[in-house]
């Protein structure tokens, strides 16, 4: 009270000393911390201002949007505020997740999400798998593909931009950075799962069992390949299949939903316990194809005919267009 009285009387230096002492004595002294936030901002001391704001944000059960607005508006107005924000967010306060959600909902929050993600990537307190997935999915839903690419290149997660993710099917769903990595949508008529290979102990692979009749997706993931020629290479093993393949791989442009390649999976062979190499080539167009969708989809017939196929060691390599091949 004495410090605030000094401030009202215009004796700001004396008020600063008193209220700094009061704030240090009690983290619950909201009026002191609130005054110090405003004082430090006027002095251009973002580090101290944000430290006091952090104190309030850790205590308030609600109303933190005022603090989040302070952080965000300061960084948008002055990039010198970013290191201070990186410091307080990097300490992993209890409000960190709520602040990221606030930025996702805020119309002009994307710039801060990107800048903060890049700044945190240089420390041991970068975005968690859950946080990064939230950011990626938000931008994916808004077609902010360049923002995704920029952040991915900065943080190096998930993996290389010029390859698919989890081609050996060893990464669990909990560790997957969505919308990247494999999605195995459940559907009637098909069963897809990343499980241990029954003829190669301790190795994971994708097993697909399809009834040959339903129109479904067995597996899919999002790619961010640059324009030009590419090939997808992998291993396949078909346990049972009708003479005509009932599964096929496709790559399409997300922006236009137009396929750039459709490649059927081979039918049955005499040796159902041997893995074989397959590959197919395609070209990513220079326009309207920043993001692609890789899918393993059904090719339904007019009657039920079960296909059981395994896939493993998938990857993308630079290469020329070629016919689908099994070898």
Image (tube, grey):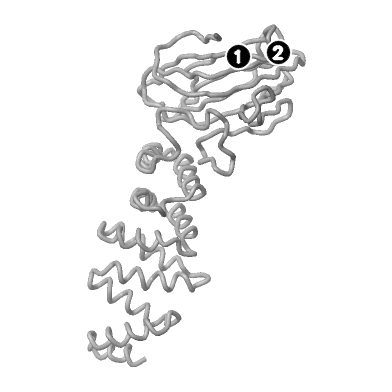
Label 1 secondary element: loop
Locate residue 32: give its quadrant. Answer: bottom left
Tally of numbered tags: 2
Q: Would you name the residue on which mark 1 appears?
A: 265
Locate residue 38: give its quadrant. Answer: bottom left
In the rendered structure, the answer to whether residue 171 lies left or right of residue 196 reads: left
In the rendered structure, the answer to whether residue 168 lies left or right of residue 273 reads: left
Label 2 secondary element: loop
Q: Residue furthest right?
A: 304
Image coordinates of residue 301 in percent, x first then y, are 71, 13
Quadrant holding the N terminus: bottom left
Which residue is drawn at the image coordinates 72% and 14% (left, top)?
240
Which residue is drawn at the image coordinates 36% and 53% (left, top)?
123
Q: Would you name the residue on which mark 2 appears?
A: 241
Q: Nearer the viewer, residue 38 or 149?
A: 149
In the rendered structure, the answer to whether residue 162 lies left or right of residue 182 reads: left
Image coordinates of residue 128 in percent, x first then y, are 47, 50
Image coordinates of residue 29 in percent, x first then y, are 42, 83
């Amino acid at each position: 009270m004495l410090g605030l009285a000094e401030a009202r009387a215009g004796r700001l230096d004396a008020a600063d000393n008193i209220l700094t002492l009061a704030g240090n004595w009690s983290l619950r002294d909201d009026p002191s911390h609130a005054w110090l936030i405003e004082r430090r901002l006027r002095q251009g001391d973002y580090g101290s201002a944000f430290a006091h704001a952090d104190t309030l944000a850790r205590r308030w059960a609600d109303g933190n949007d005022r603090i989040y607005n302070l952080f965000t508006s300061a960084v948008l107005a002055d990039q010198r505020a970013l290191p201070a924000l990186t410091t307080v967010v990097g300490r992993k306060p209890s409000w960190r997740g709520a602040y990221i959600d606030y930025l996702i909902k805020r119309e002009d929050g994307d710039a801060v999400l990107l800048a903060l993600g890049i700044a945190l990537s240089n420390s041991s307190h970068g975005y968690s798998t859950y946080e990064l997935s939230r950011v990626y999915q938000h931008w994916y839903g808004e077609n902010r593909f360049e923002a995704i690419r920029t952040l991915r290149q900065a943080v190096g997660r998930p993996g290389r931009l010029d390859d698919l993710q989890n081609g050996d099917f060893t990464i669990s769903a909990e560790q997957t950075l969505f919308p990247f990595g494999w999605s195995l949508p459940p559907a009637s008529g098909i069963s897809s799962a990343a499980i241990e290979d029954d003829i190669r102990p301790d190795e994971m692979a994708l097993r697909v069992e399809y009834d040959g009749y339903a129109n479904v997706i067995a597996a899919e993931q999002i790619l961010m390949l640059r324009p030009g020629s590419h090939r997808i290479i992998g291993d396949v093993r078909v346990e049972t299949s009708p003479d005509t393949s009932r599964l096929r791989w496709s790559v399409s442009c997300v922006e236009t939903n137009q396929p750039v390649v459709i490649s059927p999976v081979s039918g049955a062979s005499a040796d159902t316990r041997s893995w074989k190499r397959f590959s197919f080539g395609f070209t990513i167009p220079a326009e309207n194809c920043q993001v692609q969708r890789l899918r393993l989809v059904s090719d339904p017939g007019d009657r039920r005919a079960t296909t059981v196929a395994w896939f493993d060691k998938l990857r993308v390599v630079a290469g020329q267009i070629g016919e689908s091949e099994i070898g």
